[in-house]
Amino acid sequence: VNQNREQWGSRLGFILAAAGSAIGLGNIWMFPKTAGENGGGLFVLLYLLCVMVIGVPLMLAELAIGRASQSNAVGAFKKLTPGKPWFLTGGLGVLAGFLILSFYAVIGGWILIYLWDSITGLLTSQGMNTLTALNEHFTNRTTDPMYSILFYFIFMALTIFIVYKGIGEGIEKWSKILMPVLLGLLVLVIVRGLFLEGAMKGLEFLFVPRFEDFKPETLAGALSQAFFSLSLGMGAMITYGSYLKKNQNLPQSAVQVGGLDTLIGILAGMAIFPALLSINPDISPADMGGSGLIFKAFPQIFLEMFGGNALFAQIFAILFFVLVLIAALTSSISLLEVVTAYFVDERKFKRSHAAMIMGALIFIIGIPSALPTGAFDIVSSVTYDYMLPIGGFFISIYASWVWGRNRALIEIADGCKCFKLGILWHFILRWIAPFVIFQILLGKILIDLKVSESIRTTLQTVFTYTDAVLIGGALIAGIYFWFFKPASLVRDEKE
Ligand code: PFF
């Protein structure tokens, strides 16, 4: 083991840093947006299934690969299977990190713009309390290069600064304090929102699945959202896992991080939809979707929360955007960390140089995304819809077929002597996850290629049923193993 390599200071510190990577704009900005666009309840249900059956097992695989190799996303594959091209999976991840950060930081910039507008009081001033006004404000701000580029730059600079500083003190300490505050604030908004008249409509939208609305795109959307939100498919969790000590309980960590992340996404939805639909009873959430959702809904909600009192609304808005900013930063640093760790370990850069040079490059590549050029949609769709699921596909194949059950389970046994679901976990990665991901991707490709309607519908119906059987089966097996098979499967392997 490399003695100089940094390590997380404590168990809790790691959980919060990993949760910090997972919890971010994907939860607060994107989850409500995607749920809104996909009809609400059914999407949320499919999302939960994707997280439980595919997301958490894959996160465990990434953490185990990281800890076993003590290496960055590319080096991990090189170390565990030398001389084989598997390191390309890590390479795809580094590239994904590069590209995702280039648009993620643009949204981070929007958060900063809204923080700024909260501080000056503009956001909670008279005349901002209608959706029309807020819509217009959003468009003006995000298409004005003065604002969008400047604040994008500031967000990127903050990200670079923290990664430059390294793992322990910065990332870990801040996550510990700020994540709980964010949780508290969200709960406050929810509680207040639920007392507004007509709020139940929002809860109904979010939680009652309407199965007749099912489209294959809903499942594809849920899977992509799960990967993005859990920071999976690009080696972020391999990289974070590589700073772990051997005594960490990995399955428990994956469940905790996955659970916290899901909780925050659902809470963000609960903060938005009831209040949104109560204040604007005539809009449909699907029309409200799109990138502006939180920027249009929240300012209105804050004003409403305090009965139009601009000062309270302002204070609350500032607090809120500060915390969203922090959630975004703890994620953006993990994106830059994947790239940085690669250049430090494999290309022998100094950490400070790697962070600065790569950060600057990413900034330049992202400039078109910060301008109204259409680049934002292309880069985000390529990474979110394709690169992360493809990465996840290869990582699950790798962990289960190539690295192999015994080596994986022995790694996991450090810190977790009786992993009850070990065999099932391996089975999921070997058979279920690759199939489901592959089918969902293929379905998505058919849609994007505009393949003829009849072929597509037939194939997608078959896919959907097999996916339902695979996911449902895995879930039932999980419950069975958990409650009725208490034997330690890992020990059997080892002894
Ligand atoms: N999970 C982050 C979010 O939900 O905002 C985004 C993200 C971070 C995706 C790191 C991927 C990643 F590697």
Image (spheres, helix red, strand yellow):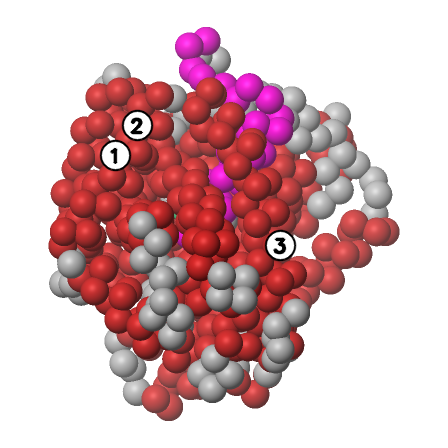
Q: Residue at x 45, y 54 (%)?
A: 311
Instruction: Judge by depth and name the residue closer to the eye, 6 or 454.
Output: 6
Q: Is residue 270 visible?
A: no
Residue 159 drawn at (x, y percent):
32, 35
Q: The magenta stretch spans which residues? A: 3-28
Residue 251 drawn at (x, y percent):
65, 39
Q: CA distance from mark 2 to mark 1?
A: 6 Å
Instruction: Judge by depth and name the residue closer to the eye, 46 or 405.
Output: 46
Q: Residue at x 62, y 54 (%)?
A: 187
Asked if residue 13 lies in the magenta stretch, the reply is: yes
Type of the residue with mark 1:
Ala
Between marks 3 and 1 in the image, the one whose residue lies nearer the viewer: 3
Query: To which residue does mark 1 refer?
Result: 157
Residue 52 drawn at (x, y percent):
62, 55
Does any atom of ligand 1 lie closer than 8 Å to the CB of label 2? Answer: no
Between marks 3 and 2 in the image, the one whose residue lies nearer the viewer: 3
Position of 405 relative to 435 (above/below): above
From the viewer's perspective, is 14 left or right of 451? right
Residue 82 drawn at (x, y percent):
37, 27
The label on residue 187 is 3
